[in-house]
Structure formats: structure tokens, C-alpha cells
């Protein structure tokens, strides 16, 4: 009886089981479904955000592509004349700054063009014309600079005379206030001045009307009187002296400047340096080759036309003539600077696979740059040559370098050239075609812009030397200046 009563009480006091405990599998399933639903909702939201972002980017790209182009700007100007006043200017400013950033990143270097007395610029052209029996215009600014291999000084001068709106893409900005300038350009026609008189007068003969030496001295006296020259002893000044003999009378008085030279052949170690100066190309004197990349019409293996007899390192020319003049499919001719010679050289280079480029009186010669624009693969035999723009041009891809001693071995040069397959010659031509604009002074984005870029890169070093000079109290005159630590000491490694 007692056991039955206890059992009855236990049944009365027992708690009913909860639904979750009795239907556990069904509850867990419902929670899983709810979790999946929330997860899918979150993913859907993220997907929508991603799609919205992508659409936004595409819309922005379409806007920029359709409206921020010169063609689109022109269409807008035609449709809405009032657009051309303010909006057009702002869009063109965007293009100018964008192009500058792409081609020449960073803030443009500011250059001041000295307004030299006319005797150092147009006056030189006038005397060059008078010395050849010409009659110059009374307005000397209308005079045309005569064509010759050192025309770079004219092209840089003309570039700085242009309004800034015509100098889009230049790495330097011309300023009219010298206080704003980083660098100062001195536009003396030093190379033309050197050849005004066709021959130096014999001893005791009548003095010529023009004296290059007197003009050099007068220029330096004028410069040394200028406030901005005296401020830094000329270190922030730029002068072109591309002819190896240019400024020879006063070179020690301008050696602090950035010198624009074709090589260091006539400069001492304390006068010229790869660190402070810029190697510039000669102005090519023959017509640019405009044909296809091909050897089909290039039947001559090796071509050379130039002065056979030169001084110093150029003596190798006569030795090469003796080795090559009787070789089959090789043309070597003696020639001087004349229209007839230039026509013959144009024909010869345009129809040859390789063009010989031996040293002249100095390691470089204009013939190298004639070869490049002719798409005639240069064969360089000049052990101490310096080349322009080597930070952007790998000359091994466009030229063949041969050590002088190797080139003078009988049969060596022609046997190697004959062994170069057509495919390799076409590779050289392809590379030449890619870089030939660097050697065209008249090209809008050619030699002039590249020279300015090279000059602009010197600015940090110029500032370093200026600040260093200001703090130094004493310098040992027997120790070379730091700017000349990397002067020309190259040695050639044959690429054959």
C-alpha cells in the first residue's frame, strides 16, 4: 500500500517534458534553416554592394574616356560654345599635367633663358653668312641658322623661345623671373662661332672681321658680371659646347657649368664629367630612312663614307681603309661635308646592312647618328666613346662594338659580319626603329626633350655641390673636384 502511494505521488509531482527535449531533431533543423537564410541574406547584400561598386567604376571610366579627351572636348565646344572658355581650359590643363606626369614624373625643373647680347646668338649667324659672301637681313632675328652637325644649340634655343603652350610634355618649364629659376641656360652658339671663319688666317695676314676667341672671352666677361652667375659660381648654368673645340679658350672658366658635349675627347678630368655634364648627339646630316624593316634592298654588307685621315684616335680610319677597301660587298669612301657627299652617304647607308663608325679626331662622330636614322646597324670601333641617353637606351641592342685591336686583324671584321644571320639583323633594325626618335632634333618628342630630361636629372647634384661649396672653408687644390670622379674612363668590351 505504501509503495503504491509513493508511486502515485511521484506521478503527480513529475514535470512534463519540454517540446525541445521531445522534438529535438526538428528544432535543430529549424535553427539550421534560419542560419542558412541569414547567411544567404548577408551574401546577397555583399553581392549587391560589389555590383554597385563595379557599376560605379564602369560609369566613371566611361565618363573619363568619353569626355576627358581632346576629341570629346572639341565636340563639346562645338555643341556648347560657352564651354570653350572655362571648362575647356580646365580639361586641357588636366591633359597637360597628365602627360607631364606620364613622360616626366615630378615637378618640372624651371629654366631661365638668358637674354644675351645679339653678338652671341644671331650675330654669330650674321658673321657666318658674311664670311661666305651672303647679305644678311637688317633684322638679325630673321636669320636662319645654317645646317651643320652641331645644330643642337639652335634647337634648344628655339625651344625656349616658344610659348609654354607649345612646349607640352617638356621636362623643363621656362620662367621669365630669374628668381624662380632652378637653372640658367646660356644660348651662345659656341659651335657655329668656331667655324665662322672657314680657315684660320695665316700669320701676318689681315685680321678677319670675326674672332671666335674674342667672342668667347666677351661672353665670359658678360656672364661673370651677372648676379646669378656670381651667386653660385656658375654651377647652376647650362652651356652647350658640342663641338669638341668649342669654348676652348675659356673652358676653365665655365667648367663648373653643366656642359652639353658630344664626348670628353678634348676635356681634362677636372673640366668634364659624366656626373655633372650631359652627352648629346650630333645632328644627323642625311635623310631619315622611312622604308620597312628589311634586308631586301640592303645589298652592301658594310658601308663607310667620311674623312679617311684624322688626328689622334681617328688615325685608325686609314688603317681600316687599307684592310677593307678591296673586300667584296664592302664600300669605304673618302668624303667631306658637302651636299654631294651627303647624297652619296644617304644612298650608301640606306642600302647597307652595317655602317662602320670609327673614331674621329675625338671618340665620337656624327656618322653614328646618321647610321641610326638610316636603320643601318652601327659597327662602332672607338674604345673610349661615350654615348647619349644611356639610361634609356641599351646600345648593345642597336649596335655592334668591336675593340680596335680586334678590328685591325686582317679578315676579322668582315668574317664576323658575314656570319650574322638575317634574323639578327632584323632584330637590330627593329630596335633602331624604336629609338631613332631620340636622335631627331626636329621631332616633337625627340632629342630636345630628352636633353632637357637629362639636364633636369642633374639638379640634385647641382644643389649638392652648391651647398657643399658654401660650407667648405678650404679645399686642397691637388685633389680633384668631386664632380669629376666619374669622368670618361670607359673601356670597350666587344659585343661580337
Image (cartoon, rainbow, N blue to C red):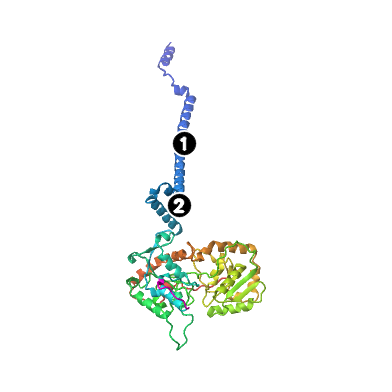
Residue 43 tag number: 1
In what element is the residue under mark 1? Answer: helix
Quadrant, the N terminus? top left
User: Is 247 on the left-hand or right-hand side of 474?
Assistant: right
Q: Residues within 10 Å of mark 2 (few under 14, many from 20)?
A: some
Q: How far across and down, in percent of the image, does residue 252 sit? A: 40, 78
Asked whether 314 or 40 is in front, the reply is 314
Q: Disc 2 designates what residue? A: 70
Residue 181: name its quadrant.
bottom left
Which residue lies at the image location 67% right of the left edge and 73% below the top edge? 328
Bounds of the magenta segment: 132-140
Q: Considering only vertical position in the picture, is 78 above or below 275? A: above
How would you classify the magenta stretch by its main secondary structure? loop
Q: Residue furthest top?
A: 1
Quadrant, the C terminus? bottom right
* The magenta stretch spans residue 165: no
Asked whether 424 or 335 is in front, the reply is 335
Asked whether 299 or 416 is in front, the reply is 299
- Distance in Å between CA atoms under marks 2 and 1: 43 Å
In what element is the residue under mark 2? Answer: helix
Which residue lies at the image location 40% right of the left edge and 61% below the top edge? 164
* The magenta stretch spans residue 139: yes
Amino acid at each position: 500500500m505504501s509503495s503504491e502511494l509513493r508511486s502515485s505521488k511521484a506521478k503527480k509531482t513529475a514535470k512534463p517534458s519540454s517540446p525541445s527535449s521531445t522534438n529535438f531533431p526538428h528544432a535543430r533543423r529549424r535553427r539550421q534553416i534560419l542560419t542558412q537564410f541569414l547567411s544567404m541574406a548577408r551574401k546577397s547584400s555583399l553581392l549587391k554592394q560589389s555590383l554597385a561598386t563595379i557599376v560605379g567604376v564602369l560609369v566613371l571610366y566611361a565618363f573619363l574616356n568619353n569626355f576627358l579627351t581632346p576629341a570629346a572636348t572639341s565636340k563639346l565646344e562645338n555643341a556648347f560654345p560657352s564651354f570653350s572658355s572655362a571648362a575647356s581650359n580646365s580639361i586641357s590643363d588636366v591633359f597637360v599635367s597628365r602627360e607631364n606626369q606620364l613622360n616626366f614624373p615630378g615637378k618640372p625643373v624651371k629654366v631661365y633663358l638668358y637674354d644675351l647680347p645679339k653678338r652671341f646668338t644671331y650675330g654669330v649667324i650674321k658673321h657666318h653668312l658674311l664670311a661666305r659672301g651672303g647679305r644678311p637681313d637688317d633684322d638679325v632675328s630673321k636669320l636662319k641658322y645654317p645646317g651643320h652637325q652641331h645644330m643642337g644649340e639652335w634647337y634648344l634655343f628655339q625651344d625656349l623661345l616658344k610659348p609654354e603652350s607649345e612646349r607640352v610634355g617638356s621636362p623643363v618649364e621656362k620662367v621669365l623671373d630669374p628668381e624662380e629659376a632652378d637653372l640658367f641656360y646660356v644660348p651662345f652658339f659656341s659651335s657655329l662661332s668656331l667655324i665662322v671663319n672657314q680657315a684660320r688666317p695665316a700669320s701676318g695676314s689681315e685680321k678677319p672681321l670675326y674672332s671666335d676667341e674674342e667672342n668667347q672671352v666677351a661672353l665670359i666677361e658678360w656672364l661673370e658680371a651677372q648676379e646669378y652667375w656670381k651667386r653660385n659660381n656658375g654651377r647652376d648654368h647650362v652651356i652647350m659646347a658640342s663641338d669638341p673645340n668649342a669654348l676652348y679658350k675659356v673652358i676653365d672658366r665655365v667648367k663648373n657649368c653643366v656642359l652639353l658635349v658630344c664626348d670628353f675627347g678634348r676635356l681634362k678630368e677636372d673640366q668634364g664629367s659624366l656626373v655633372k655634364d650631359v652627352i648629346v648627339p650630333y645632328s644627323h646630316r642625311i635623310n631619315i630612312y622611312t622604308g620597312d624593316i628589311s634586308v631586301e634592298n640592303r645589298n652592301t654588307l658594310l658601308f663607310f663614307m667620311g674623312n679617311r685621315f684624322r688626328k689622334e684616335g681617328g688615325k685608325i680610319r686609314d688603317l681600316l681603309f687599307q684592310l677593307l677597301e678591296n673586300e667584296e660587298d664592302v664600300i669605304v669612301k673618302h668624303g667631306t661635308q658637302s651636299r654631294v657627299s651627303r647624297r652619296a652617304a644617304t644612298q650608301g647607308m640606306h642600302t647597307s646592312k652595317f655602317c662602320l663608325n670609327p673614331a674621329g679626331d675625338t671618340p665620337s662622330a656624327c656618322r653614328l647618328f646618321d647610321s641610326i636614322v638610316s636603320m643601318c646597324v652601327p659597327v662602332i670601333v672607338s674604345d673610349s666613346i661615350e654615348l647619349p641617353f644611356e639610361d634609356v637606351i641599351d646600345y648593345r641592342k642597336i649596335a655592334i662594338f668591336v675593340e680596335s685591336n680586334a678590328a685591325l686583324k686582317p679578315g676579322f671584321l668582315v668574317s664576323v659580319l658575314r656570319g650574322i644571320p638575317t634574323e639578327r639583323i632584323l632584330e637590330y633594325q627593329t630596335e633602331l626603329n624604336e629609338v631613332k626618335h631620340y636622335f631627331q632634333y626636329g621631332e616633337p618628342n625627340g632629342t630636345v626633350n630628352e636633353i632637357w630630361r637629362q639636364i633636369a636629372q642633374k639638379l640634385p647634384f647641382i644643389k649638392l655641390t652648391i651647398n657643399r661649396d658654401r660650407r667648405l672653408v678650404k679645399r686642397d687644390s691637388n685633389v680633384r673636384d668631386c664632380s669629376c670622379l666619374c669622368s670618361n674612363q670607359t673601356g670597350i668590351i666587344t659585343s661580337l
